[in-house]
Each structure stands twice: as C-alpha cells, then as structure tokens.
Amino acid sequence: MSDKTTNHKAWFLVAPVVALVAFNALIPLMTVVNYSVQETFGDNVFFWEGVKWFEDVLHSERFHASLLRQLTFTGIILVIEVPLGVAIALTMPKKGPWVSVCLVLMALPLLIPWNVVGAMWNIFALPDIGLLGKMINGLGFDYNFTQQPIAAWFTTILMDVWHWTSLVTLLAYAGLCSIPDAYYQAARIDGASRWSVFRYIQLPKMKRVLTIAILLRFMDSFMIYTEPFVLTGGGPGNTTTFLSIDLVKIALGQFDLGPAAAMSLIYFLIILVLSWIFYTLMMRNEEQ
C-alpha cells in the first residue's frame, strides 16, 4: 500500500484567510482581554486590576437590568417571529409565476441596511407626522414612542418583526419545498386533516431549517444595536437600553475601557452558552 502524497502548497492558499481571520477576530479579542484585566489613564500606561472589572460588572444592577431587557426582547421576538414566519411560509405558493414575486417581496426587508431600518421606523412612528403614529392616535390611543416606555417597546418589537420575520419565512419555505409530493398524496389518500399534514409531514421536515432560524434569530436579536439605537436611542430613559447599547455607552460615552471590555467578554460568553444550550436541546428533541 503506497503512502498518500500530501501537497503542502495548499497551505499557501489557506494562509491569507487565516491571516485575515486573525487580524479581524483574534487580535481585537486579545486587545479586549488585555483591557479587561487592566486600567489605563492614557499615554498607553496600564495598571493591573485582575478580575476586578468582571466582579464589578457581575454585581452591577445596571448590567442586570440591561440583561433582563435583552432577554425579554429576545424571548418576545422568538415567540412572535418563528410561528409567524412558518405561517407565512405555509401560505406561499409552491408553483407558478407568483413564487418569484413572493420570494422577492419576502427578501426586500432583509436587503435594507440596519441603520436605514431604524431611521425609516423613526419617521414612520412619529406621533405628529408619522403614518403609524397618526393612525394609532387616530384610533383613540395615546401613542408616543419617544415618551412612553410601552410604546417604545411596541415600536421596537414591531420594527424587528417587520425586518426579520422574512428570514424565518424563507428558511421555512425552503424546508417546505424539499418535501416530496408523494407525502401529500399519501396523506390525501388516508384522509388526513390539514393539521395532521402539518404536524406529521411538514413540521418534522422543517425541524432542521427551523433550528437554524431559531439560532440565527436568537443570536441576532441578542446582539441587536443599530435599529433600536437609531429608533429610540435606548430611551425613553433606559427603557430600550439593551446590553449592546449599554456596552457602547460605557465604552464610548463614559470611556471606561476596563469595565466595557469585561462586559463585552461576559456578553460574548452569555451568547455562546445560550446558543449552545439552544442547539443541544433542539438536536436532542430532533433525535427523540
């Protein structure tokens, strides 16, 4: 049996990618780790602090409040967008000229830059000149997302649902299109109800794409920054100040680099652990 020939020249093709990843990820990460255990007052002079900043962040009521707001927002987003995306995907045509039209319409919100989405909804929801604001106030409700916490949450959630439900819809639609027609023909012969078809044919076939959709929406909603910052600026007060917005305020607004670095690492670990838990539970459920 002859030995397999290894071509080491292939590493020259991989080296630029490795260098790019190291520059864009590893080096900034090491910088954050460096700041998280030290204090600096400028002039590139550092003082060792150890885990002091991590302790301060973990015992901070400000961090706890921001984390609670972030978890609440992410939970609401998942509860709304995943079922809504699946429902829209079920109503979309599988054949004919309308398929392309529906797919384009679904993809349009995803093509709009995040800062533009925030600016659009800021104008759209203004109580005096915005179409949404004037319509809600015209129905007899007192609506002003710049002053009322509940209105600010409602507007932020509505904006995110409009922007990102399309992602769940497109993924669910891809799962539905992969189901062979023979499954539906067998269900019709057996006289299966619409609910039975969804429960025993469509939903099992969509489990993998829904796993991806849930993970993507969880991570993205947990890291959301641009849209709510442009829309509400984290207000009124701190009502919509999520972890990402609070982190930027500490790092750039207060220029507390040590606590901000420690908070960013804790933030990263929370996302990593929760994503792993989500993935493990969904994979275990799928295997069962």
Image (cartoon, rainbow, N blue to C red):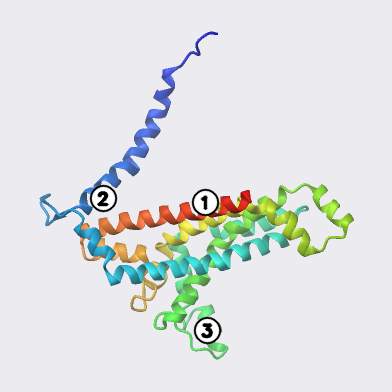
At which x and y percent is residue 206? Answer: 66, 53
Mark 1 = which residue? 280
State the SS at label 1: helix
Decide: few, some or many residues near mark 3? Use Cα within 10 Å; few <14, some 14-19, many ≥20. some
Name the residue carrying label 2: 32
> With 258 as the anchor, is 5 left or right in this view?
right
Q: Residues within 10 Å of mark 1 (few under 14, many from 20)?
A: few
Q: Amino acid at mark 2?
A: Val
| Real-space CA distance between mark 2 and mark 3, rounded to the nearest whole angstrom | 45 Å
Residue 158 x/y as whole percent: 52, 72
Disc 3 marks which residue? 134
Observer able to see residue 112: no
Q: Earlier in the sequence, mark 2 or mark 3?
A: 2
> Mark 1 or 2, which is nearer the eye?
1
Task: State the residue in front, 54 or 210.
Answer: 54
Q: Secondary structure at mark 3?
A: helix
